[in-house]
Each structure stands twice: as structure tokens, then as C-alpha cells.
Amino acid sequence: MKEWFFSMSVLEQIYFWIAVVATILLIVQIIVMLVSFGGMDADADGVFDTDGDMDGDGGLSFFSLKSITAFFALGGWAGYTAAIFLPNIWAPVLISLAAGTVALVGVGFAMRGIAKLQCSGNLVTEKLQGQTATVYVSIPPQRQGRGKITLTAQGKFSEFDAMTDEAEKLKADEQVVILSMDGDCALVARKKQESAEENKNEAPMSEI
């Protein structure tokens, strides 16, 4: 195994490690997503907090964490394979960029399609108040614009436009709480994490 790895060129080693790391991260994200679809609380999404999304005109985020990970995973394996068979250094680079772009766009459209498919049907938005959701497209602060949130509610994986009164932008994959619904747009706030100090304050006072 060691001899096989060091027999590779520097370019092959770079692409190999990019592909392996990105593939592992992508598998973890898929598992978290499947758990979320199953109706369980996917707090593990907080491990992958990122600000790597850009708001498009149609609300479709091609630069979410999942799509960027897919870019490096597929692009890494394509570049590694091309580096083995093509001696030209630029050919693997171009091939990896092309393959990664296909993966990035494909995952972006796939996530959009899943959200639209799952949110079809009768959904009582009034009952979403107080529900926890995940930011899909970053939400500008102080109602300066709209972002996107996703959540599993009433047996459906749904996507909604979202605004916030928070002073700072809500980043992609961040956990938020729905305060109210106005049609298909939600007013959300950052989900506060319970601290150990707060729990201690709730403990009964000692007898005098």
C-alpha cells in the first residue's frame, strides 16, 4: 500500500487526497440528510456550518456545502484518473474542473427538486411556528432580503423563503426557529443552544 502510494506522481497524490477527503465528507452529509428525512432531529448539521452559498435570482444555491463537497469529490476522482493516463498537467486540471462543475450543478438541481417534490400537497403553515429548520440559502440580516430554509414537517420535507430580524446574516446549514409564517415566507431567528451554566442556574438552592 505504501509503495503504491509513493509510486504516484505529486499531481496524482494531490487529486487522490482531495477525492478521498471530499468523498468521506459527502457520505457523512448524505447520512445526515437521510436521518433528517426520517423525521429525526439532525442537529449534526451544525458540525458543517459554512458560509459557502450564494443567492441566485431563483433562490437556487449552487454553492451550498453539499454541492461544493460533490465538486471536490467527483472532480478529485476525475483528476486523479486523468493524471494516470494523461501526461499533460493541464488536461487533468481541465477534466477535474469540468467534472466537478457537473457535480456541483447536478447536486444543486437535485436538492431543489427534492425540496419542491416533498413540499407539494396540503401543508398547514400555521402549525410551523416554533419548529426548527435548517438554512439552505443564507438569510440577510434585518429583513434586507430573503433566503431559504428547509425542514421536515407534517411528514413532508419542505422548503420556504425566509427572513430574519437578526443583526447578523444566518449562514447556510445553521439551525433556526420559525417565529411566524406569512404565506410561503417564514420569519426566523437563530436557534439558541442551551449552555451548561443555564442548567446549573436551574438547580435548587441549598438549604440555609
Image (cartoon, rainbow, N blue to C red):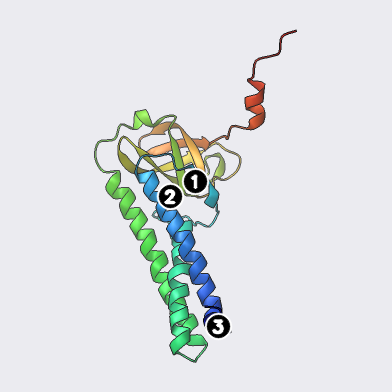
Label 3: which secondary element: helix
Which residue position holds label 3? 3
Of residues 165 and 81, the one drawn nearer to the viewer in this rendering? 81
Label 2, label 3: how far apart the Cα atoms are? 36 Å
**Could you tell me residue 22's position as x and y percent?**
49, 65
Image position of 133 with respect to 180: above or below: below
Earlier along the polypeptide chain: callout 2 or callout 1? 2
Disc 2 and disc 1 in contact, CB within 8 angstroms: yes
- Name the kind of residue labelled 1 in the image: Ala
**Could you tell me residue 32's position as x and y percent?**
43, 49
- Name the kind of residue labelled 2 in the image: Val
- Name the kind of residue labelled 3 in the image: Glu
Crowding around mark 1 (Cα neighbors within 10 Å: few <14, some 14 to 19, many 20+) is: some
Farthest residue, direction left: 121
Which residue position holds label 1? 44
Of residues 103 and 85, the one drawn nearer to the viewer in this rendering? 85
Q: Nearer the viewer, mark 1 or mark 3?
A: 3
Label 1: which secondary element: helix
Q: Nearer the viewer, mark 2 or mark 3?
A: 3
**Could you tell me residue 43's position as x and y percent?**
49, 42
Disc 2 and disc 3 in contact, CB within 8 angstroms: no
Label 1, label 3: how far apart the Cα atoms are? 37 Å
Crowding around mark 2 (Cα neighbors within 10 Å: few <14, some 14 to 19, many 20+) is: some
Give the side of residue 138 with respect to residue 208, left or right: left
Give the side of residue 32 with respect to residue 144, left or right: left
Label 2, label 1: how far apart the Cα atoms are? 7 Å
Quadrant position of the C terminus in the picture = top right
Which residue position holds label 2? 32
